[in-house]
Structure formats: C-alpha cells, structure tokens
Amino acid sequence: MPHPMTTSPSSAARQQAADEIRRRQRFVLSCHVRPDGDALGSELAMAYALRALGKQVRIVNRDPAPPPLMAFPGVADIEIAGHVDDPGDAVIVMESGTLSRTGVTGLERGFIINIDHHLGNAMYGAVNWFDVSAAACAEMVFDLVADLGVTLTPEIAVHVYVAILTDTGSFHHSSISPRTFDIARQCTEAGVDPPAVARAVFDSNSLGRLKLFGAVLSGMELDPSERVATLFVDRTLTSDCGGTYEDTEGLINLPLTVKTIQAVVFFKEEGPDDWRVSMRSKGDVDINAVARAYGGGGHKNASGCSAVGPYGAVKQAFQQKILEQIEQCTASSSSTSRKD
Ligand SMILES: [Mn+2]
C-alpha cells in the first residue's frame, strides 16, 4: 500500500536520473512482462521526451501491448524481444521491481536507471528512483520530462494520461492524490481528449472477449455466505467463445462490484491438474497470505500463484483459506468496534 515518503531521497534520485539522461545519447527502454497501461505509457512518454531532446531511443519489451492500447502513438513500433545485444549508453527500466521482471536479457550489461513506484523494488540500477506515493509510474515520468525541459506534447500527454487512468483503475484506487488530478489536468490542457481515451481503452474489446466474460461469469460459484466468488476458465471455454486467455484480463475484478463479495479466486487451466491462480480482495482481506502459502505473491488485495491437483480439491483448499482470511478481518474489526 502506498504511503508518503520523505521527499529528499526521492528528489535526489530524480535529479540524478535527469543528470544521467542529459549526458547520454543512446537509450534502451524496457518494462515488466505483459505490459499494462502504466508500463507502456511511462515508456512511451519517456521515449517521446528523449527524442525531443535529439536522443536515440529503442523500446524493447518481451510481450506485446494489450490490443486496445495498440491505438496510441508509438505503441505499434515497440520491439518485442527477449534479449538485447546493445544496451546503449543507458537502459531505463520502468515499473519493474526486479530487472528479471522485464523478461529481457542483456539489459544488465548497461547503465541502468530504475524508475518505479512499487513497494519492495530491489534497487538494481546505477540510479534508483523509487516513489511509492506516485499513483502511476507515469506521474514520475511526467516530473522527469519537466526536469529535462521538454514541452508536454500531445503524444507525451496522452501516454501519461492513459497510464494514470489505467493504473488508478479509472480513478478508483487509494493511491490517487490531488497531484494525480493536477497532472491529468495538465495533460488535458496539452490536448488529451478524456472521452476519446476512455473509449479507446475501455470500449475497444473484441466480441470474443465479451462472450468469454459472460461465459466465465455464468459459471461463477459463491460460498454459502456469498463472500468468496470462484471463477474458472480453460482452453475449451476460451476457444468456444472465440477469445483467448489474454482476453480474461480485468475479468477478475468484476465480482468485486457486488457489495457482499469480499474476495475472488480465478482458476486458469495451464495443463492437466495445473492451475494459474489469481486472487483479488477488498479492504483488509489479505489474499497475499494465501498466495504466499503456495509460493506466489503480490499485494494484499491482488495476488497470484500456481497450484497443482484435481480442480475440486484445489478449489476447496483456496476457498477455505480465503474464508479464513475474511474471518480474521471480521474478528479483528468486531473486537475493535462492537456494534451490540
Ligand atoms: Mn504502475
């Protein structure tokens, strides 16, 4: 969970990042595997700013962008590769807690500038600028672009805006600050059209994705107390709907829109009796504790792991462990605030 940091170490690192960028010419930018709106927006805002300064930039990601984000400037030109031979004069890694999270080898031979807002960043760079108070990594990039004296062009502004819009869950999460809206305002003044961006990001799904959402949600199971929702998908269901596993992105959040539901567990079949397990929760329900018990991890409200075994047994084990976490919260909140 984000918390305010003292400004001095962060601003010293920010200045160091700007200084190192000014004195270098050739850059490689990368981000975490399966890039999201913040990873791509941060990279592209940075890339446009560096090019405005006359520098050479390559963006190298292991995985392609989600289809709705392909519509934004420069996204289609990103190189998709698992290795770089030439790390240039500097590598700027954004949104990655560790360097291996990029899935790109060869970056480690470069001069690394690490820019991130996730708790627990491994500080793997020659420069490490890390600010957990930023609602999106792109808020940091926005500051860096200003430090470098680059004008906020429509291209830079749209990428910063998309990053903030997506990383805050459409202005839904606790990481939002007045500053988030101030940056969004400046992006809007620089030419961003918020309804057009929202249409492109949220209203550009394939029909297969919508049908898959319907099929998976139709199969949703609830425990008797209606606090834990269980979702299931396999390759057969996916292809019957004309979708892909990537199309299930974001689906896990929908059960949480029901008031009574406190947690969701989503099982994706990877192979026979082999499951990719994603979990989400509300408030103080710590599903990360459940993921850690299976060798996985993430955050308190969003975590994941792998599990093996017959579906019925795996499902029951997770449902029980999640209910235990919910009971723990209920017990601690009723002991501090008795209503009777
Ligand atoms: Mn982010």
Image (cartoon, rainbow, N blue to C red):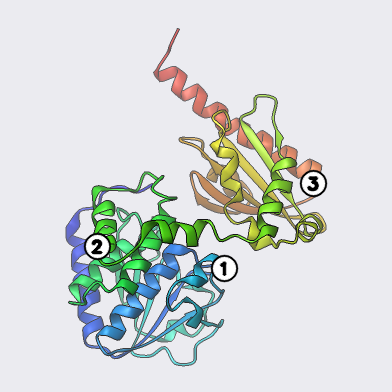
- Foreground mark, 1 or 3, reads 1
**What residue lies at 36% left-to-right and 67% top-to-bottom?**
158
Displayed-image quarter of ligand 1:
bottom left
Give the label on residue 189, or none: 2
Where does residue 278 sit, x and y in percent of width and height? 62, 50
Placement of 279 over or under 14, stated as above or below: above
Q: Earlier in the sequence, mark 3 or mark 2?
A: 2
What is the x, y in percent for residue 17?
Answer: 25, 75
Nearer to us in this view, 243 or 299: 243
The residue at which mark 3 appears reads as 311
The first of marks 1 and 3 along the sequence is: 1
Q: Nearer the viewer, residue 134 or 218?
A: 218
In the shown orientation, is residue 238 left or right of residue 43? right
Q: Which residue is mark 1?
A: 67
Label 3 Cα crowd, 10 Å radius (few <14 / some 14-19 / many 20+): some
Q: Could you tell me the amino acid type at mark 3? A: Tyr
